[in-house]
Image (cartoon, helix red, strand yellow):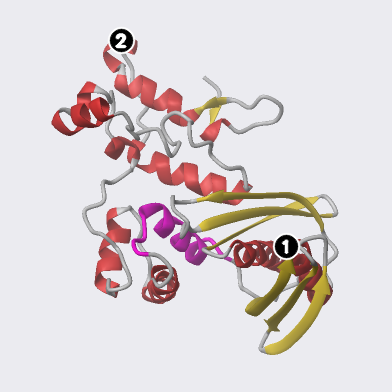
Amino acid sequence: VECTINGIGERAGNASLEEVVMAIKTRKDFFGCETKINTPELYKASRLVSNLTGLMVQPNKAIVGANAFAHEAGIHQHGVLRARETYEIMKPEDIGLTESKIVMGKHSGRHALQKKISDMGYELDKDSLEKAYQRFLKVADKKKDVSERDLEIIVAEEVYVVPEDYKIESIEIKSGTNVEPTASIKLTYKGKELKKTATGAGPVDAVYKAIEELTKVKASLVDYSIQAITGGTDALGEVTVRIKDKDRIYVGHGADTDIIVASAKAYLAAINRLVYATTARP
């Protein structure tokens, strides 16, 4: 069977590796074979591919979608609590999903964060853990509880990164029904401070124009998408952008409770990848 993680592929895609593998694992008595694939790594692999390609996993996707192990109806919830196998032919743990036993919030310390991240299957070195912890504190300060999905984004932003030549220092937005959207942004480039104010069709457009003028990068924005990682008005929003320079695509991700800030982070992350890929290094 030809398959790919998340079923990605040109045109109509391919069979999803995670679905094929779990079907064989769950019904091995019927198929009479096994794959030798380490299934607890499936969920992490799915998220990694999604982050690197910029192609989001649909919430209703089998196995790795956000709703795959969700139960809304009361009778279903009661049944799952009493006997999980009643409604689930496989366990979340089989694909690497862990049930939260530690509630993470602004009072959680480094040790609790390290334990939680470790339970999720990630191992960070001391420096990466400290960066993740500082990022965690900023998120926790804006919302009551930090979910596992929030932590996944935080870890991804610290682990799967390239050197940040450009960094965001501050963003100010003016927007409204009778106001031309205006963005004032301050960046640092290798320690040097850069400032620019720009207007646009909307606040995100204004921010992107200001960033483009500061970085002098003239790549084409080919895709912009946004999704709420968790529920509620204090949800962490994740923005994914794909920019094109010549024949190459660069993906950037940004997450924040402020969607304008998340959009700026994503665009600048993509630009940093482009700069890193096109700059000669010794």
Asked if residue 195 is among those painted magenta in the image, a careful observer would answer no
Find numbered disc 1 in the image and state the secondary structure of the residue it sits on: helix
Would you name the residue on which mark 2 appears?
A: 30
Picture disc at residue 127? none
Cα gap from disc 2 to disc 1, whole angstroms: 53 Å
Residue at (82, 60) in percent of width and height: 201
Residue at (66, 89) in percent of width and height: 191
Residue 196 horizontal/vertical position (percent): 79, 81
Q: Give 77 or 15, whichever is nearer the viewer.
A: 77
Q: Give 97 or 108, whichever is nearer the viewer.
A: 108
Residue located farthest toward the left when viewing the structure as drawn: 82
Q: Give 90 or 256, whichever is nearer the viewer.
A: 256
Residue at (32, 24) in percent of width and height: 25
Would you name the residue on which mark 1 appears?
A: 204
Residue at (42, 46) in percent of width and height: 44
Q: Amino acid at mark 1?
A: Val
Residues shaded magenta: 144-161
Q: Is residue 95 above or below residue 203?
A: above
Q: Residues within 10 Å of mark 1 (few under 14, many from 20)?
A: many
Residue 215 horizontal/vertical position (percent): 79, 74
* Residue 162 shown left or right of residue 40 in the figure: right
Asked if residue 157 is among those painted magenta in the image, a careful observer would answer yes
Q: Mark 2 touching mark 1, by CB under 8 A? A: no
* Residue 282 shown left or right of residue 152 in the figure: right
Residue located farthest toward the top when viewing the structure as drawn: 30
Q: Quadrant of the C terminus?
A: bottom right
Camera-side mark, 2 or 1: 1
Find numbered disc 2 in the image and state the secondary structure of the residue it sits on: helix
Majority secondary structure of magenta residues? helix
Q: Is residue 182 above or below residue 177?
A: below
Residue 269 horizontal/vertical position (percent): 65, 65
